[in-house]
Amino acid sequence: MFRPHKNTVSVGKSVETRFLSLRTLVTPGRDGGVAALTWFLDHDYRGALPSSSLVEGWRIRSGDMQIGDNGLLQSLFPESRFNAWCVAETHVLDARIVPSGRRDQFEQNAHYFDLMNHLAPQARDVAHRCRASSIARNLVRGIDSRLAECAEHLVCLRRERCPRSRLPNSANNSKVSSTTPSACPP
């Protein structure tokens, strides 16, 4: 049996993301045994992984069989879209957590609900990683934009084509707003 997992995954036309670490989780059963084993492949969480990667989403297995599809556990996430940002698998070991007859869900019993309660904090952790990555990307994008604007102003100053009164941070304007128009004429 071959799995589609590799060290990298394509997230766009020319963008790849590299898996950075493997995290594992042992979920205890109600009687002190092991109910399930889970692994997560962490990466930079740039966005949702494409379905063509065949690895996106948190999957769940019982025995050697996948139960449901990669969206079965998305209800554990604060925002269901974050399920497509992760690569994870849970292997159910507790025989009391029984797949339904159609193998698209599990029978709803105390052992199944206990497993879901143990997995939910991990889904929130993945969502937190997704949000943190998004915030960092937006900050970098904003900084890049401001640096480009500053570079335009420097070119203008070097050419001495603009009067100082049109430049941001002049004596009349001590704050630069994000809506300040470019100081140099085209």
Image (cartoon, rainbow, N blue to C red):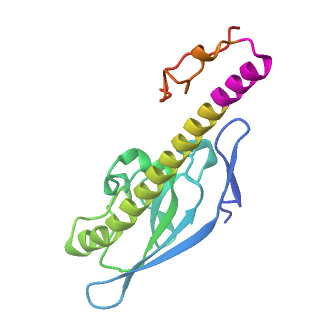
Magenta segment's dominant SS is helix
Q: Would residue 22 be seen by someone viewing this image from the given angle?
A: yes
- Based on the picture, tell me whether residue 155 belongs to the magenta stretch: yes
Classify the position of the N terminus by image quarter: bottom right
Q: Residue at the spot x=64%, y=64% of the render?
A: 20
Q: Tell me where residue 57 appears, x and y as whole percent.
A: 49, 53
Q: Would residue 182 be seen by someone viewing this image from the given angle?
A: no
Above or below for 38 versus 124: below
Residue 184 relative to residue 114: left or right: right
Q: Residue at the spot x=49%, y=65% of the render?
A: 89
The image quadrant of residue 143 is top right
Q: Tell me where residue 186 appears, x and y as whole percent.
A: 71, 8
The image quadrant of residue 161 is top right
User: What span is in magenta?
Assistant: 148-161
Above or below for 33 versus 83: below
**Of 178 and 80, which appears nearest the observer?**
178
**Of 147 and 160, which appears nearest the observer?**
160
Q: Residue at the spot x=25%, y=74% of the render?
A: 114
Residue lying at the far right in this picture: please name it: 159
- Based on the picture, tell me whether residue 135 belongs to the magenta stretch: no
